[in-house]
Amino acid sequence: MPVKKRICFVCLGNIVRSPLAENLFIHLAKQAGVENEYIVDSAGTSAWHEGEAPDARMRRVAERHGLQYGGSARQFKRSELDAFDLILALDRENWSDLNAMARTPEQRARIHLLREFDPQSDGQSNVPDPYYGGIDGFEITYQIVERSVSGLLGALQAGEL
């Protein structure tokens, strides 16, 4: 039996962007019939929202696209740099925080920006955090995460990672 690839999506608080990315990845992998090839999780670089459910506004937007999910926020731990094969930061600040935790070149090589896989990124590396804005920002974030996660799954299935 092949070894499952372990993936973790990381944002600041683990209530908006990273749980969306985690659940969109799982959803798309199921649609492609490859969900058994991956172990997927999400976390935040901070503990501000630890134990809280994902943001209700983001979940409402996701539901309009046919995706329902739950879960609870948790903080990423340094030991997880070795536990995951691929760690996807949702923005450059979280990417920097994760790299600051890393102690070896192997750990740093596992850390990527999610928008590296967005075919429409136009050089933008951050998935915007809509937390303090209106519902339109949540829709924009959903679209970016969906494109990026789809690109990531394609790259994984093509053996590029």
Image (spheres, rainbow, N blue to C red):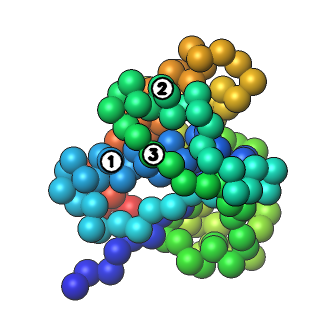
Left or right: 47 in relation to 32:
right
**Amino acid residing under circle 1:** His
Left or right: 100 in relation to 131:
right
**Amino acid residing under circle 2:** Val
For marks 2 and 1, give the one nearer the viewer: 2
| Mark 3 or mark 2: whose residue is earlier in sequence | 2
Specify the quadrant that holds the C terminus. Answer: bottom left
| Mark 3 or mark 1: whose residue is earlier in sequence | 1
| Residue 44: quadrant of the picture | bottom right
Looking at the image, the residue that sits furthest to the bottom is 1
Marks 2 and 1 sit apart, C-alpha to C-alpha, by 15 Å
**Which residue was labeled with disc 3?**
69
**Amino acid residing under circle 3:** Tyr
Residue 10 in picture, x, y percent from top left: 62, 53
Return the residue nearer the eye: 58 or 97.
Answer: 58
Left or right: 52 in relation to 66:
right
> What label sits on residue 59 in the rendered view?
none
> What label sits on residue 27 in the rendered view?
1
